[in-house]
Image: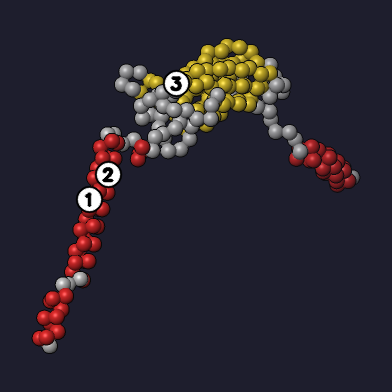
Amino acid sequence: MNKAKCLLVIIATVTILAAISPALTYAEPPATVNIYAWTDKTNYDPGEKGTLKIVIRNDRTDEDLILYNITITYPWFAFTGEKWEGNDTITVNEAIQKNGGIKTYTREFTVPSDGRAVTSTPGQISIVVNVDKAPHQYRETAPIYVKSVPFYMSLEDGDKAITLLTILVVLVIVCTIILAATIFLSVRRPQVVWKAEEKAE
C-alpha cells in the first residue's frame, strides 16, 4: 500500500512539473529601467557647445522608483591640475512611476579645445542613474564624435612649405633642361671632327 501511495505522489509531482514547465520556459524577463541618450548633433568641433538629451523609462512592473541623481562622464574627463573637468551631476529627487513612467532631462556641454577631446575613435558618454531600490544603479552610454584635424593639415607656416615646394619644382625644371642640353650636345658632334676621323682611318 505504501508503494502505491509513493507512486501516486511521484506521478502527481511529475504531472504538476510538466504543467508549469512551459510557463517557466517562456517567462518574461524581469523588467528594468531603460536609459536612452543622444547628442543634438552628429559630430562636434573642438571648442563647440552641444546638448545631451537623456530619457529614463521605468519599465519595472513591481515598484515606483525615486531618482536620486544622474551622473554624466564625458570622454574628456580629466583632472586639469586645479579641478576635475568633463563630468556633470543632475540632482533629481523625483519619483518615476512603474510600468513605463518617463522622465526627460537635457544637459549642455562644451567640447574642450585642447587635446583631451581628440581621439581616433568615437568617444562614449557614460550615464549612471541612481535610484532608491535595488539594484540602485542603471548604466548606459551614448556615442559622441569629435572632429580632429588630420596631421597634414595642421602644419604651421604652410606658406613657407608652399614656397619651398615651388622653388624645388623650378630647380627640377632647370636641371632637366641642363641635362637635356648636355645629352643633345654630346651626341651631336661637329662635322669637321667626323671628316678628320674618316681620313685617319
Residue 191 x/y as whole percent: 16, 75
Q: Looking at the figure, which quarter contains the C terminus?
A: bottom left
Earlier-in-chain disc, 2 versus 1: 2
**Is disc 3 surrounded by few (<14), some (14 to 19) or many (20+) residues within 10 Å?**
some
Q: Looking at the figure, which quarter contains the N terminus?
A: top right
Residue type pointed to by label 1: Leu
Q: Secondary structure at mark 2?
A: helix
Of residues 156 and 87, which is closer to you in this image?
Answer: 156
Residue type pointed to by label 2: Thr
Q: Is residue 67 above or below residue 29?
A: above
Residue type pointed to by label 3: Thr
Residue 171, label in figure? 1
Would you name the residue on which mark 3 appears? 110
From the image, state whether disc 3 or disc 2 is nearer to you: 2
- Please indicate whether residue 91 sits to the left or right of residue 184 in the image: right
Residue 134 x/y as whole percent: 60, 23
